[in-house]
């Protein structure tokens, strides 16, 4: 019932998603011109027709940015952490303590409804953009097992993004103001997720450290899987590690909420 109600609400006021989604792809045009100039310059210096940066050639780079936009659309949770801390600070959290509704489960279902509504409406703009940019996907559609791994990484990326943001929001039980912490965490998440550039472009020592963190599963990993940048024999292990991070954030979020509720004090009507 919660999921259905949330879906109905979002379909009513999300009719602008078609145009809005197309507008979100406009920065890709800038990226195409930018990376075209970068690869041309490197090719001229090194005397190669097909320059390569971090294992990516020019078509791969454009395809990578398109795929990371899909991944980020799954894993991004705008206003979730700030909304949780706001409810704690304003006392709205009290209603979840006296009603038979699980707070985290309620938020998860509303986010699922948000994503379902978003992709139902935005699938046509996505299809149009990917059709127009099909020449950048040089290797075409990945093998079936790779595609299933890509889909699994998107779903787990969504759940990691949700529980990570919810965990950050739970800090509101201990600190009244978390906006500065949120800004720092989101900055690290945006940079280390690979949304700005493929993580293989980082120096070896830094790349090795970043690969131990969960952020890469929010954008870089799904795109790399689709483009075949992750060897097929390594896919099961990488997906298992992503699943382990998911379990960690689920448990950490539940523990933080349980402990936060125990120390919470609400006053007034």
Image (cartoon, helix red, strand yellow):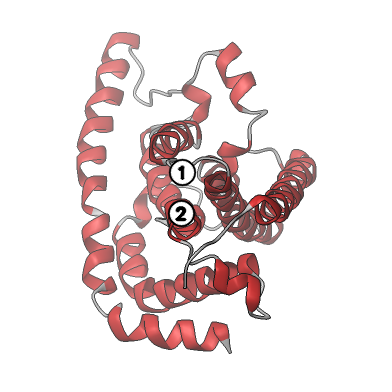
Instruction: Identify the disc placed on residue 30.
Output: none
Residue at 43% in and 59% down: 90
Q: Mark 1 touching mark 2, by CB under 8 A?
A: yes
Where residue 120 sits in the image (x, y, percent)?
A: 42, 78
Residue at 56% in and 16% down: 206
Where residue 149 sits in the image (x, y, percent)?
A: 68, 55
Question: Is the residue 100 above or below the residue 57 in the image?
Answer: below
Residue at 64% in and 20% down: 208
Residue most extreme to the front: 268
Q: Residue 131 falls in which quadrant of the image?
A: bottom left
Please indicate whether residue 85 sits to the left or right of residue 34 in the image.
right
Quadrant containing the N terminus in the rendered view: bottom right
Please indicate whether residue 200 sits to the left or right of residue 41 in the image.
right
Question: Is the residue 188 above or below the residue 112 in the image?
Answer: above
**Residues at marks 1 and 2, CA–CA distance in whole angstroms:** 6 Å
Residue at label 2? 89
Neighbour tally class for label 2: few under 14, some 14-19, many 20 plus, Cα within 10 Å: some
Residue at label 1? 176
Where residue 128 sits in the image (x, y, percent)?
A: 30, 68
């Amino acid at each position: 019932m919660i999921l259905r109600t949330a879906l109905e609400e979002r379909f009513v006021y999300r009719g602008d998603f078609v145009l809005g989604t197309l507008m979100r792809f406009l920065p890709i045009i800038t990226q195409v011109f930018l990376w075209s100039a970068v690869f041309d310059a490197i090719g001229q210096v090194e005397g190669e027709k097909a320059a390569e940066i971090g294992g990516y050639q020019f078509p791969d780079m454009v395809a990578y940015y398109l795929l990371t936009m899909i991944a980020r659309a799954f894993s991004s949770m705008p206003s979730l952490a700030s909304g949780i801390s706001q409810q704690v600070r304003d006392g709205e959290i009290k209603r979840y303590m006296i009603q038979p509704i699980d707070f985290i489960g309620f938020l998860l279902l509303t986010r699922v409804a948000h994503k379902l509504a978003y992709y139902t409406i935005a699938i046509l703009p996505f299809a149009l953009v990917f059709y127009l940019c099909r020449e950048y996907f040089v290797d075409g559609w990945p093998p079936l097992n790779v595609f299933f791994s890509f889909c699994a990484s998107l779903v787990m990326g969504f759940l990691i993004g949700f529980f990570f943001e919810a965990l950050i929001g739970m800090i509101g039980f201990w600190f009244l103001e978390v906006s500065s912490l949120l800004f720092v965490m989101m900055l690290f998440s945006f940079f280390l997720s690979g949304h700005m550039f493929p993580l293989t472009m980082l120096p070896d020592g830094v790349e090795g450290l970043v690969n131990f963190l969960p952020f890469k599963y929010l954008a870089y990993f799904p795109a790399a899987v689709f483009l075949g940048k992750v060897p097929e024999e390594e896919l099961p292990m990488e997906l298992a590690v992503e699943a382990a991070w998911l379990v960690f954030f689920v448990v950490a979020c539940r523990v933080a909420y349980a402990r936060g509720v125990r120390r919470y004090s609400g006053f007034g009507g």
